[in-house]
Image (cartoon, rainbow, N blue to C red):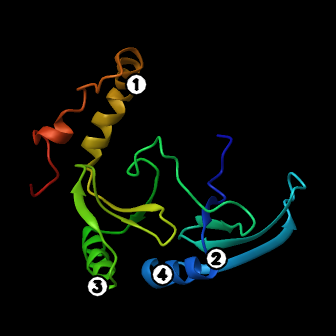
Amino acid sequence: MLIKKVHHVAYRCIDAKQTVEWYQKHLYMEFVLAIAEDEVPSTKAPDPYMHIFLDAGQGNILAFFELPSQAPMDRDRNTPPWVQHLALEVDSLETLLATKQRLQAAGIEVLGPTDHTIFQSIYFFDPNGHRLELAANTATPEMMRKLDDVKWAMLDEWSKTKRAPKHAAWMHDGSMGAPGR
C-alpha cells in the first residue's frame, strides 16, 4: 500500500485561538503545533496565515488555517450541510452518550444518536460551521463481512442507475440488528 496513514486533514477556521480552545474544551484534543507564514510555501503567494494542529488521537492530526486576508469563510452552497463532515470515532456507545450530554450542557446543539446499524453517531457543528460526527462502532464481524461481500455490486449498480441498491437493505429494515436489539 502506498499510503501509510493520514498525516493531517486541514480545514479553514474563523479564529485560530478560538478553534484551539473549543477543540480542547469539548473534544479534549491537545494543541500540538502552530505554523505561521506571510507567504504560502508551495505557491509563494503572499497570504499570511496561522496553521494550527490538534491531536485527534492515535497519530491523527486535525489542522486548521486562519486566513485573515481572504474573503470570509463560506461553504459550498450546492452541497447539503449534512454531506461535508468530519467523523471521529469514540471508544463506546457510553462515551458517545456522555459526550452528547456534555456538549448539550455547554449549549451546543446535538443531533442523534442516529443508529446506522454498524455504528451510532451524534452530529454537531464547531464554531467555524464545520459539521462533526462522533461515531461508536456497533458492527459485528458478520455485518462487516456481509457489507464487504456486496460493496462492488452496489457500486456497479449505483454507477449505472444512480438509485440506491438494496444489497444491504438489512441495515435499515431491522432484519439483522446488532446484538441486544
State which tag comes first along the sequence, 3 or 1: 3
Horizontal and vertical percent position of residue 125: 41, 66
State which tag comes first along the sequence, 2 or 3: 2
* x 65%, y 72%: residue: 53
From the image, tell me which residue sits under label 4.
28
CA separation, marks 4 and 2? 16 Å
CA separation, marks 3 and 1? 41 Å
* Position of 164 relative to 15 (above/below): above
Q: Amino acid at mark 3?
A: Ala
State which tag comes first along the sequence, 1 or 2: 2
Residue 135, by quadrant, is bottom left
From the image, tell me which residue sits under label 2.
16
Question: Which label was assigned to residue 155?
Answer: 1
Of 66 and 152, which appears nearest the observer? 66
The mark closer to the camera, 1 or 2, is 2
In the drawing, does residue 170 fall left or right of residue 1?
Answer: left
Q: Quadrant of the C terminus?
A: bottom left
CA separation, marks 1 and 4? 37 Å
Task: Decide: few, some or many residues near mark 3? Use Cα within 10 Å; few <14, some 14-19, many ≥20.
Answer: few
Horizontal and vertical percent position of residue 35: 78, 73
Q: Amino acid at mark 2?
A: Ala
State which tag comes first along the sequence, 1 or 4: 4
Q: Amino acid at mark 1?
A: Leu
* Position of 144 relative to 7 (above/below): above
From the image, tell me which residue sits under label 3.
105
The mark closer to the camera, 4 or 2, is 2
CA separation, marks 2 and 3? 24 Å
* x 80%, y 73%: residue: 36
The mark closer to the camera, 3 or 1, is 3
Asked whether the beta carbons under mark 1 and mark 2 sit within 8 Å of each other, the answer is: no
Which element is circle 1 on? Answer: helix
Task: Decide: few, some or many residues near mark 1? Use Cα within 10 Å; few <14, some 14-19, many ≥20.
Answer: few
